Image (cartoon, rainbow, N blue to C red):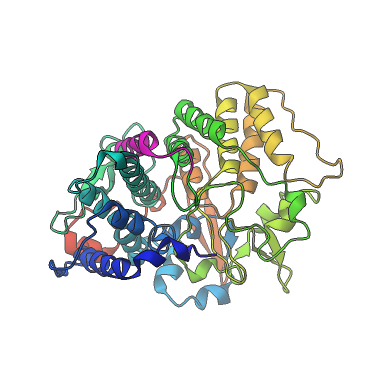
Amino acid sequence: MRYNYFIKSYNVLILVISIFCLTACKKYLDLKPNKSQVVPSTLADLQALLDRHDQINEFGPQLLDMVADDYYLTTSAWQSLPDEYDRLNYIWDKDASYLSNWNQTYQHPVYYANVVLDQLAQIDFDESERTNYNNIKGAALYIRAFAFWELAQLYCTGYSSDAANDMGIVLRLSSNIEEKSTRSTVQKTYDQIISDLKAAAELLPESTAFPTRPNKTAAYGALARTYLSMRDYTNASYYADLCLQKYNSLIDFNTLVPVGNPPIAQFNKETIYYNHPGYTPALNNSRAKIDSVLYKLYNTNDLRKTVFFKSNSDGTFGFQGSYASRQGEYMPFDGIATDEMYLIRSECFARAGNKDAALADLNLLIGKRWKNNGSFVPFTAVSASDALNIILMERRKELCFRGVRWSDLRRFNLDGANINLSRMLNGTSYLLPANDTRWTLLIPKEIITITHLPQNVR
């Protein structure tokens, strides 16, 4: 189901809005829009614009999963990729960039959110509509912050003690196409994300009819994810806990076997906020092979081994366990879900020395993933440090192709984990050493040429 009923009442309006937005967005390539075009002018218009899930919830950066280590490509599959962007990013080439990965995120969720926020400031509305006004404003702030966080994991260095000096992303806070693009700092980037999300949490409703619309629970979940990427485990724990207090349902994977097509429903009971990245051929599950080391981590009684992965005719495995797949169509999921929140809270408990609470969360989650045949033995640990190692391993297994692995690797390496990545193609090994400058991707060269933004270090 594509939620077409979101926009049926607004077909003509949305067409006009879409033309305006897509034309105006071309300012990022220095093309002038037609300023005579109609813009949304009522709360109903703005809600209809935010309900364009095909423009907002389906444009996360493809690179978050593409540059991570959940999969590999054979030489022939890599050579068959139609876009040089994909081929170079797969091997972390020092000159690799990805124009659409940057443009799509800024031109869709960020731009749409800013159009709504700018128009809200100009709309006259009756005080009886205050709740609706707040919900729309909160949703726009959330959408912008969610997109900024994903961009930050790619285009600025990981959050560290140098955050006030390191270059951040471009913080587009207005739909004004004449506004000059400038780079913020990492500190200002995260300050903006957190400010938007906290404001959204105050404005958003307790629940929404559709998971493509953010609510208060989703804002808490996004704050937990943001603070985790900053290695602020106290605040990450706090917001994961607030999120789970609001909503904590888990899927019992025993109910998914035998697996369907897709194995996990698109809008399932764990989904708090639905989002997925734009399509890239490199991650097509007929092309991307699951890392064999990752696959071997799953016990035979662990139902994720069956639900997440499908066998290929050549003895390899592909991923099929996305929370965003539709029948006959595969797409990774990078939204907010309850399993991630349990893992965040569990990890933070362990880092705080609370071993028992950490294992309680982990066992509750993983107990829903194993065969219901008495084979699951709850995890135990001799220390909080031991528990943390177990939790991080289960995080690795639970959250593959969820848009967070790249962020995890960056924060682990900032803590001294010294994790190196490698690819093998046609007998040649391509390496990405821990904390190499290539862990921060290049802003597309076309953008640098037009805007004269400072480029990331190489």
User: At x 34% / y 39%, what residue is drawn?
Assistant: 131
The image shows residue 210 at horizontal and vertical percentages of 50, 52
The quadrant holding residue 36 is bottom left
Please indicate whether residue 272 sits to the left or right of residue 452 in the image.
right
Counting from the top left corner in percent of width and height, residue 34 is at: 14, 70
Q: Residue furthest top?
A: 353
> Can residue 235 be seen at all in this image of the molecule?
yes
- In the figure, is residue 281 to the left or right of 119? right
Q: Give the range drawn in magenta.
A: 190-207
Front in this rendered view, residue 458 or 260: 260
The percent position of residue 166, horizontal first and vertical second, equals 28, 41
Residue 226 vs 45, above or below: the answer is above
Classify 173 as above or below 93. above
Residue in the picture at 82% in, 45% down: 372
Prevailing SS of the magenta stretch: helix
Expressed as whole percent of the image width and height from the top left, the position of residue 237 reads 51, 29
Q: Which residue is more in the foreground, 457 or 294? A: 294
> From the viewer's perspective, is 16 left or right of 50?
left
Image height check: is 158 above or below 66? above
Q: Does the magenta stretch include residue 200?
A: yes
